[in-house]
Amino acid sequence: MSTLRMFRKKPDDLGFFGKLGFYCLLILGALVSIFPFYWMFVVGTNDKGAVFHVPPLLTVGDQFFDNFKRVLEKSDFFQALGNSLFVSSMVTISVVFFCTLAGYAFAKYEFPGKNMLFVFVIATLIVPQQLGVLPTYVIMAKLHWIDSFKALIVPAMVNAFGIFWMRQYISAAVPTELIEAGRIDGGGHFRIFWKIAVPVITPAMATLGILNFMTVWNDFFWPLVVLKNKEHYTIQIALQQLFTTRDGLDYGMIMSATFTATLPLLVVFLLFSRWVIAGLTSGAIKS
């Protein structure tokens, strides 16, 4: 209970030792979170036997570029990286836009069957994704979209979690009086949404965007099902190709590729971290 009370307080309200313990705990948590990435980089800079070293190696080697050179020989790494960046960006933009529109409609408009429709949307969250693979594949085949980026982008353009997330955030963050004032001033529906609601809900949109970007970037199963040509492979399929070898697994090569494939996620998160943290903590702390 004392630990919970410490987190409920602001750091400035704690004494010297309490503040010291608070920041030490945060630093420890950060180090524990960063260590897997650091160890992955260490293995990627050493030979393929470094992963079996006892005790584990913690010093950076000098073979990163040699390992990564073998990655380029075995796969079209940068092309796959670009494919994933394109697909993830397109899906994220569409999800943020359409889910924000749907969440705004569910939060601030009244229409027949609204509650029932929202319950139906939420109910889709309990359906395992694997159950939708076969019918979605049949639809993609009927549209002749197999082995194309459209098969990855279009089915993922909107999702139930995004609608739920934006609906809950808009309900709490956008006052109805503000929308009514916009209507009195002669604003149309989309103008009120764009000029009044969007500036207020930017943290929630950024949070949804980064979570969705990470989900699409890390997706392996659906791209494996619909993509046939190597020119269309995403980064996760390209990484899987590195495991198919007759000479045993080259962990130095694999880790160098995996570390490089993780960098875009880190860059995106760092660019939008301020809005993401604001979106996740909104309403959690009362002033």
Image: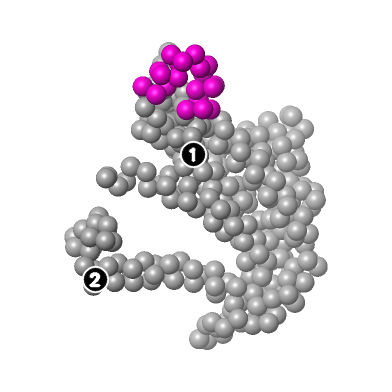
User: Which secondary structure, mark 2?
Assistant: helix
Q: Residues within 10 Å of mark 2 (few under 14, many from 20)?
A: few
CA–CA distance in space, label 1 to label 2: 36 Å
User: Which secondary structure, mark 1?
Assistant: helix
Q: In x, y percent, where is residue 280? A: 41, 47
Q: Is residue 186 magenta?
A: yes
Residue at figure coordinates x 27%, y 57% from the top left: 10
Q: Residues within 10 Å of mark 1 (few under 14, many from 20)?
A: some
Q: In x, y percent, where is residue 96? A: 55, 36
Residue at figure coordinates x 44%, y 24% from the top left: 106
Above or below for 78 versus 277: below
Are the two marked residues, 1 and 2, in contact with CB atoms closer than 8 angstroms? no
Determine whether, in the image, residue 83 is placed left or right of residue 155.
right
- Most extreme residue toward the left is 1
Residue 138 showing in the rendered view: no
Above or below for 75 versus 88: below
- Disc number for residue 202: 1
- Most extreme residue toward the front is 185
Magenta-highlighted residues: 177-196
Residue 1 showing in the rendered view: yes
Residue identified by numbered label 2 = 16
Residue at figure coordinates x 33%, y 68% from the top left: 23
- Quadrant of the rendered image containing residue 170: top left
Foreground of the two, 258 or 272: 272
Looking at the picture, which amino acid does disc 1 mark? Thr
Where does the N terminus fall, quadrant-wise?
bottom left
- Mark 1 or mark 2: name the one nearer the start of the chain: 2
Foreground of the two, 262 or 275: 275
